[in-house]
Amino acid sequence: MLQLTKRTEYGLIALVHIAERGAVDAGAFVSARDICDRYPIPRRLVAEVLKALQKNDLVESQRGPTGGYVLARSPESITLGQIVTALEGAPPLTSCESPILLKSGGCEVHSVCPIRSPVHRVREQLWGLLEHTSLRSLLPPATQAHYAPRAAHAR
Amino acid sequence: MLQLTKRTEYGLIALVHIAERGAVDAGAFVSARDICDRYPIPRRLVAEVLKALQKNDLVESQRGPTGGYVLARSPESITLGQIVTALEGAPPLTSCESPILLKSGGCEVHSVCPIRSPVHRVREQLWGLLEHTSLRSLLPPATQAHYAPRAAHAR
DNA sequence: TGAATTAGCACCAAAACAGTGCGGTATCGA
DNA sequence: TCGATACCGCACTGTTTTGGTGCTAATTCA
């Protein structure tokens, strides 16, 4: 399906929320509880998603009371592509394109597959789109202004 | 998952094959057997996929011996977006965007969802990409030349 | 008539996804 | 020091989607 998973969706909500808080309270950690108090998302899921984002260096975490998460980098430098990759992996558009072709079947058409290279082109364009969409561009205007693109708000 | 289904993949292979045959034998019907003789695709699946494409007016079908499928329109006027829509529906990028919000849960975040409209923008871009990719552009160069864009090969 | 083909129905197995339980570990504040 | 609060990690379950199959009917050509 050409659709983002719920995990990615939750990740986006969380990241936007963290960015918003960060704009007000620079350096403050946002806990998972904060997020699911505001949005009806299972706490467990948020934790799981944030963990994945942390492992991909998109957020930093801090334990203990007053702990939580902060953006590891400026919203300008975090892309939608990175977020999707962190939460879903970087799946090929079709099975033809899988790097490990024959894992569970894979593309048996391989050498005679007529759509491999054209679809590859489309895939490149699609990921280009995701790579050129920054987290900043997903923020509400007010917050967006706070993270001025040139202000080098690298945290 | 941000990935096309196997059905769509098979559909693309089938359409490309039909277009290639059509370039040689204009007006000849291509049977499902022809397709899965050439590519290792379950015959049943091809039939199912082609049926869906037929219902969406992308191919025309003919029963009986010498029967099969032909493109209903010129490859130039068939877009990747139409193919995906025919085989997978037109799924929203995130559940927030579902027209029928609360079908099976849907987006409970609704009014407070901070990512709905920005994600909607991204979705528009993505589908724009698919809508601007024609079947013709997916064909091998030789066949592509046969379906010259201006030649009004509308069959 | 008979063979070849699409059409339509329901059905099954495997995989991915969404969500949960439980216990462990780090950290801050009193 | 103690306890509350928060993240961490593993495994597990139920549901949905996906991929694939069986069988039969309807259509068409030789």
Image (cartoon, coloured by chain):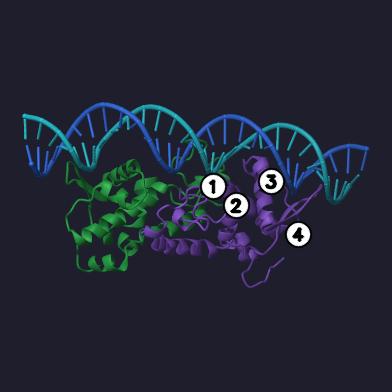
Chain colours: A green, B purple, C blue, D cyan
Q: Earlier in the sequence, mark 1 or mark 3?
A: 1
Q: Earlier in the sequence, mark 2 or mark 1?
A: 1
Q: Which residue is mark 2?
A: B87
Instruction: Give whichever of A110, A107 is nearer the camera.
Output: A107
Q: Disc 1 sits on a residue from what chain?
A: B
What residue sits 19% from the left and 65% below the top?
Answer: A152
Could you tell whether C18 is left or right of D28 in the image?
left
Measure how far apart labels 4 and 1 are at the Cα level: 29 Å
Measure how far apart labels 3 and 2 are at the Cα level: 12 Å
Q: Nearer the viewer, mark 4 or mark 1?
A: 1
Vertical placement of B84 versus D10: above or below? below
Q: Residues within 10 Å of mark 3 (few under 14, many from 20)?
A: some
Q: Dot 1: what SS?
A: loop
Q: Earlier in the sequence, mark 3 or mark 4?
A: 4
Q: Residues within 10 Å of mark 1 (few under 14, many from 20)?
A: some
Marks 2/1 in contact by CB < 8 Å: the verdict is yes
Q: Dot 2: what SS?
A: helix
Residue A140: give x, y in percent of width and height: 32, 65
Q: Dot 3: what SS?
A: helix
Q: Disc 3 sits on a residue from what chain?
A: B
Q: Which residue is mark 3?
A: B47
